[in-house]
Structure formats: C-alpha cells, structure tokens
Image (tube, rainbow, N blue to C red):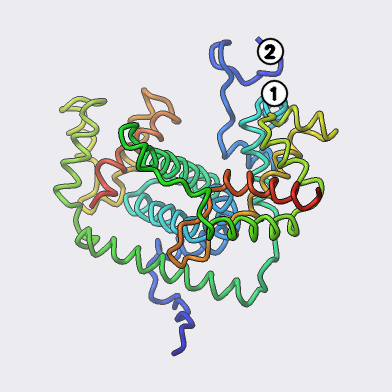
C-alpha cells in the first residue's frame, strides 16, 4: 500500500474525505491527526485534489458584480426559493397532519431494515404532524447501522417517500 | 414595468422559512460558485441551488437534524450535480444504428465563424500560463505530467484549468437564443487551431 493512504478502510482501499471534511480542512478546524491524514491523502489522490481546488475557488470571496447587482439577484432568487417552498407546502396539504400516503411510503422503505413490527413501533413514536419523523427514525437506524449509513438511508427514504409528493 | 423583486418580509415567514432564508443569505454565493464550476450555465447552477435549498426545507420540515448546514448543503449539492451530469451524459448517448444521422457540424459555415470568434475571445481572455496548461491538457496529459512540464504543483494545474473553464463557459454556453451551443471539447480544439493559425 502507498504510505500516503493514511485514511484507509480495512487496510485495502483509500477512503476519500467527504466534502464536509474538505471544508473543515480548508477552515483549519479539524483535529491535527485528521488534518495530517487529509493532507497526505490530497497529495496522493488527484480526484480529491481537483475537488479540493474546486472548493477553494468557491470559498474564495469574489467581487465580479457590484454589491447592488448581487444583492438584487440574491433577493430575486430568494423570493423564488420561498415561492417554491410554499408551493411544496401547499402540495403536501398543510402542516397539520402527516399524510397517510407519506406514512405508508416511509413504512414501506423502513420495513426492509426494521421489519414490520419494528417499523410499526418506531412510527408510533412520531407525532401526528410528522414534524419529528426523521429525527425519530434516524437515531434508531443509527443504533445498528452507524451514523453515516443511517444518514444515507434517511436521505434515501426522503427521496423515495417524501420529496416526490 | 418595474421588475425589481419585492423584498421578502420577515413577518411573513415561519420559523423554518426564516432558517432557510438565513442559510440562503449566508451560503448561496459560495454554493453558486461551486455549482457553476460543475455546470455549463449560471441558470443550471441556480436551478441546482434552488433544488438543494428546497430539499433542506423539506428535510427540516420532517424533523431532520442538520448539525452542519454548510457541509450538508455542499454534500447534497454535489450529489445533485453528479446525478444531473450522469443523466445528461446518458441522454446524449447515440444508438449505433442511428450514427449515420448524426450531423457533421465541422463544415457548417456559421459554426466556423462561431469558432473563430470564440478562439479570438478566449485567446484574449486567458493568460499565457493558462493557455499552456490548457494546451497540454488537450494533448491528453494528466495533471501530474502538466505540473512537471510547467514546473508547478498539480493542485495549481487544477486551479488553472478550473479558471480557464470558467472563462470559457459564457462563450461556450451561447447566448440563449436557441442556437446549439459549442461543445467545450470542440471549443478547446478550435481555440488551439485558431491560436496556431494566428501565430504562424
């Protein structure tokens, strides 16, 4: 194995630092050991180096457009975002109650991992409006999958069960 | 007609909307630059940003705890852009049976004019160092080899190419008038032909 691959999985393949780690590395807010590991990984891995350079470019403040023009464009984009947010809220039928369709789809996605009974038990703890759905489900999945895998699975559940409303 | 957008009134926003708006104001400029380095137009980058912030709102609505919003937004944006790139690559595939119908644009006179204009514009916009870097890349050299030739670090090569691509993008993306934009590889190829012809 090349010595520079200090971030390794099971001693066979390098694990590439995720984007959060690269940002942390750039901001200098990671523990020293992790900083060193990422620095040597970047020396050895072209793909991550390119990604890191891309991030550095993005994180560098630029002033191509004047502040007034930028602010106007930002306001227009933000207004558009909030219009999309409200359209989504309208489409889901209001915040009062978790829609049965969403509940069924979440249950279906969870059953593969928790079984029918486990899924039923977990969903019983969710409030009627569903406002704590993901914060109830994610820690349970994390108990036996680990935080990263649980997070990825919750993202998958959101894709399958929620976003398509 | 005044197209100035209405300022977003704080009192109209609920708590989560305020959270999303605050995240937007804090992170959208850098995220937009990041997205723009992946896409061919600013509009695509803006669309990606809208998707990602809507996603943030949706997940927070259902109670997702996001401890590091900035990192989360970058991660979701990157995944979104990669999915888009994969989809775009897939939809551009041409079945081999239909190859005879693929038009050859190289002899189109309008296209020739477009290319020579692009070559002139780009030659004027990039520095000698960026041009040298782009030329070596277009010859098929990897970052390490380019770095050795130019006597710089490979990371610098990445930064130079990223800058060149940003400069090229507006010319390559076209003016939105319905005309088919030049492909980036095609533009680079003609850039060097143009430069060589010009210098010889």
Please provide percent x and percent y for residue A155.
36, 39
Q: Are marks 2 and 1 in contact (CB under 8 Å)?
A: yes
Chain of the residue under label 2: A
Q: Under tag 1, what secondary structure?
A: helix
Left or right position of B197 against B55: right
Relative horizontal placement of residue A15, taking residue B128 as reference (left or right): left
Spatial CA span between label 2 and label 1: 9 Å
Q: A78 or B32: which is nearer to us?
A: B32
Q: Which mark is residue A145?
A: none
Task: Pick the residue in front: B11 or B145.
Answer: B145
First of labels 2, 1 by sequence position: 2
Q: Quadrant of residue B94?
A: top left
Which residue, given by chain and number where applicable, does mark 2 sit on?
A2
> Residue B180 appears at what percent x and percent y?
46, 57
Residue A141 lies in what quarter of the image? top left
- Residue A44 is marked as 1
């Amino acid at each position: 194995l090349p010595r520079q691959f200090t971030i390794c999985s099971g001693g066979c393949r390098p694990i590439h630092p995720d984007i959060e780690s690269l940002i942390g590395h750039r901001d200098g807010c990671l523990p020293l050991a992790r900083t060193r590991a990422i620095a040597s990984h970047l020396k050895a891995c072209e793909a991550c180096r390119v990604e890191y350079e891309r991030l550095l470019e993005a994180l560098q403040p630029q002033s191509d457009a004047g502040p007034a023009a930028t602010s106007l464009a930002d306001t227009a984009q933000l207004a558009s975002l909030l219009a999309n947010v409200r359209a989504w809220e309208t489409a889901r039928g209001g915040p009062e109650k978790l829609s049965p369709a969403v509940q069924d789809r979440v249950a279906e996605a969870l059953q593969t991992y928790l079984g029918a009974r486990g899924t039923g038990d977990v969903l019983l703890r969710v409030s009627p409006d569903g406002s704590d759905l993901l914060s109830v489900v994610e820690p349970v999945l994390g108990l036996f999958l680990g935080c990263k895998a649980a997070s990825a699975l919750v993202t998958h559940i959101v894709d399958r069960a929620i976003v398509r409303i | 007609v005044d197209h100035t957008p209405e300022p977003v009134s704080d009192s109209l926003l609920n708590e989560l909307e305020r959270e999303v708006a605050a995240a937007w104001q804090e992170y959208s400029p850098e995220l937009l630059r990041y997205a723009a380095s992946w896409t061919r137009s600013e509009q695509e980058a803006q669309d990606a940003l809208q998707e990602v912030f809507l996603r943030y709102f949706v997940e927070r609505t259902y109670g997702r705890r996001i401890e590091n919003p900035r990192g989360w937004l970058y991660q979701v944006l990157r995944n979104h852009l990669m999915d888009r790139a994969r989809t775009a690559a897939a939809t551009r595939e041409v079945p081999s049976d239909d190859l005879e119908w693929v038009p050859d644009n190289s002899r189109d006179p309008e296209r020739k004019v477009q290319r020579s204009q692009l070559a002139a514009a780009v030659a004027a916009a990039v520095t000698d160092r960026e041009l040298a870097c782009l030329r070596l890349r277009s010859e098929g050299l990897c970052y390490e080899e380019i770095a050795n030739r130019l006597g710089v670090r490979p990371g610098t090569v990445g930064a130079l190419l990223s800058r060149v691509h940003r400069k090229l993008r507006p010319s390559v993306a076209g003016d939105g008038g319905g005309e088919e934009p030049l492909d980036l590889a095609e533009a680079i190829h003609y850039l060097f032909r143009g430069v060589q012809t010009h210098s010889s």
